[in-house]
Amino acid sequence: MPNSSGSNLGPLKAAAPSVATAAYSVRASAERLQDIDASRLLPQVAEPLAAAVKELTQAKDALEAAADAATIAPAMLGADGPRNYLLIIQNNAESRATGGIPGALAVLQLDRGKLSLGTQSSATELGSMSPSVPTDPQQEQIYSTRLGKYMQDVNLTPDFPTAAATAQTMWAKKFGQRVDGVISIDPIVLSYILHATGPVALNGPELSVVQSAGLPTELTGSNVVTTLLSDVYAKIPQPKAQDAYFAGVAKEVFAALSNGKGEAKALVEGITRGTEEGRVLVWSASSVEQSVLTKYPLSGPVSGESVSPAEFGVYFNDGTGAKMDYYVKRTVRLIKACPADGYEQTTVRVTSTNTAPADAATSLPAYVTGGGNFGVAPGTVQTNIIAYGPAQANVESASIDGQKTPFAPYLHANRPVGVIAQQLAPGESKTIEFTFGKIVQHTEPNLVVTPTVQAVKDVVLPTENASCG
């Protein structure tokens, strides 16, 4: 793990060719065994063969990932010179497709494995881009030109490489610094890190504001999520003071990391968990490194090698202009129908509930409810729900609580997209369904969702399969 004194990255760099050779050898062995026609074999031979193929395939995948890491990780960690990454902390209390609105920003420097935090800022401080940063017209059609105008909106698109490249350009326009890549995390990942490092204490200039507001001056894995996504808005009404608090927390958490606090195994497990949940995203400005990263979900693309053939995506973009998503609970499920005419058909069911108190309009701060400033009644949550189907499929219909409803159809990276804007009053629950047809892929579907305050395992429910004769 990176730390304040640096790491010897030489052994990792030197191991790359050997690991790549091992991966190639295991892959070749697995492919040879897969070519054997097991239908002609006795069960006593076919069963061990199937087990061997499975084990070799798992070993192949692990070795190929290790080979890729050994190839690009040393340079990305600063083995060949300092690397600067724009660190974005997404705020899940106001949803964006990749997680939450970009709030706290900082430059993360890695130099021969030594980690340090540089310039800190916020999306608010960057202001609006004039002229706007050019972005993909296909995505602008779905998500508006705000993609290239405001740092807060670069991740209205679920395609993280697009969001990251745009953020890199915005940072360069504002500060004159071209970062080498972009790393994104959220407060839930911070909680995983703090569970490993132990508590951190705030000691910066924001301390007096924090103490007077009654916010904790010590952040732990147990209180950081509620503090950053709810309590800070209830107790500190000034956005600049909120930004200062976020910046102070980020500084102390990464100071703990750089000083080597905590057990390395627990840190790796926490960051791995965050990556599996889509809460850790990485983009490199190096085309060579990015071509390797795109093999893996942590690169966050909507198309490419890491996207499964039958992939569905459900993403949430706040339309309230506030921090009400902290109170929204959701479940998402795929429902597979029986194939017809050689095609698959799958329905994506999204159930959302606004758990805010009935008197949210008056009991919650206007900064949390939006105060009606964007045309949404205080206490009500408006969300743009975006559903992606597999490439070449069609989005055929949509319904709300069983009643057919109009929706906005689009295309992104050859994938069909359906969008519905939904409002939920306190205590209200609604179910939206998008039906996708003409699906040519016959593999088991995969579902990706916007990581929210909830645990992903509680949001993504098991696929329902129709009983087909």
Image (cartoon, grey):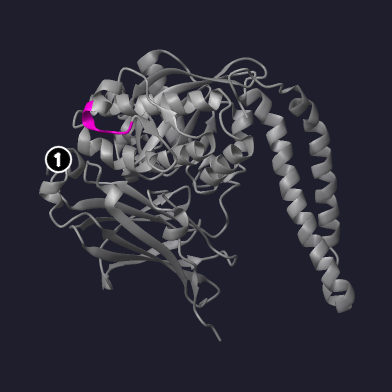
Left/right of residue 8 with respect to residue 309 in the rendered view: right
Q: Is residue 338 visible?
A: yes
> Regarding mark 1 in the picture, which secondary structure is present there?
helix
Percent x, y for residue 181? 52, 26
Q: Find out whether residue 178 is within the magenta segment.
A: no
Q: Is residue 130 visible?
A: no
* Figure disc tally: 1
> Which quarter of the rendered picture does the C terminus lie within?
bottom right
Where is mark 1, residue-wise?
366
For the view shown, which residue lies furthest in the bottom direction?
A: 469
Percent x, y for residue 45? 89, 72
Observer-nearest residue: 426 or 397? 426
Q: Residues within 10 Å of mark 1 (few under 14, many from 20)?
A: many
> Which quarter of the rendered picture does the N terminus lie within?
top right
Q: Residue at 53% of width from left, 22% of height from top?
A: 180
Q: What predominant SS class does the magenta segment belong to? A: loop
Quarter residue 468 falls in: bottom right
Question: Amino acid type of disc 1?
Answer: Ala
* In this view, 285 is above or below 157: above
Left/right of residue 315 with respect to residue 360 in the rendered view: right
Left/right of residue 361 with respect to residue 322 in the rendered view: left
Q: What residue range appears in magenta?
A: 212-216
* In this view, 222 is above or below 129: below
Q: Residue at 65% of width from left, 23% of height from top?
A: 75
Q: Residue at 38% of width from left, 31% of height from top?
A: 218
Percent x, y for residue 268? 60, 39
